[in-house]
Amino acid sequence: MVRESMLAYVDELSDDRVLANDVVTMLEIDGLIVYTGDYDWRVQLTDKGCKAAQMGLARYLKRQKLMEKLKEYKLFVGIASATVSFVSMLITLALTIYNAVKL
């Protein structure tokens, strides 16, 4: 679709040209659309945009938030695991030294 045609269509849906430009800009910033061609810029959905269109945008955004939370939890679990391993190593070292001194 030609970029101007898409802007006109979005403008018809919203009756607000500023809102139409904001929506199109948001789609571009989020990586859902890309402009191709040298003449009369054409709008094309990216792979991410195709997935969002198939799932529905609301469901797609909900999934994205869930994925971000999972990344945060993964980081937290990694830090906790490293801390437990470090404490376990210190306890093992202390017990080894204690047993060596005891003998």
Image (tube, grey):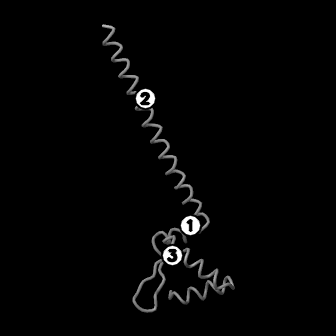
- The kind of residue on which mark 3 rests is Glu
Q: Which mark is residue 87?
A: 2
The residue indicated by pointer 1 is 55
* Callout 1: SS: helix
Residue at mark 3 to residue at mark 1: CA–CA distance: 18 Å
Q: Position of residue 99 (x, y in %)?
A: 34, 12
Q: Position of residue 49 (x, y in %)?
A: 50, 72
| Residue 14 place in picture, x, y as percent | 68, 82
> Is tag 1's residue or tag 2's residue first in the polypeptide sequence?
1
- Which numbered mark, 3 or 1, is in the foreground of this view? 3
Question: What kind of element bears circle 2?
Answer: helix
Residue 86 in which image quadrant:
top left
Q: Is residue 58 above or below residue 19?
A: above
Tell me whether circle 2 and circle 3 mark residues in contact (CB < 8 Å).
Answer: no
For the residues labelled 1 and 2, the Cα–Cα distance comes to: 45 Å
Give the alpha-carbon distance from disc 2 to disc 3, as whole Å. 47 Å
- Farthest bottom residue in view: 39
Q: Residues within 10 Å of mark 2 (few under 14, many from 20)?
A: few
Q: Is residue 50 left or right of residue 57?
A: left
Q: Earlier in the sequence, mark 2 or mark 3?
A: 3
> 93 or 41, which lies in front?
93
| Count of all numbered marks drawn on residues in the image | 3
Determine the residue positioned at 47% across, 86% down: 42
Foreground label between 2 and 3: 2
| Residue 79 circle label | none
Q: Amino acid at mark 1?
A: Met
Measuring 62% from the left and 82% from the top, which residue is drawn there? 20
Q: Which residue is mark 3?
A: 28
Give coordinates of residue 70: x percent, y percent: 52, 50
Give, as a three-letter code, the residue at label 2.
Val
Q: Residues within 10 Å of mark 1 (few under 14, many from 20)?
A: few
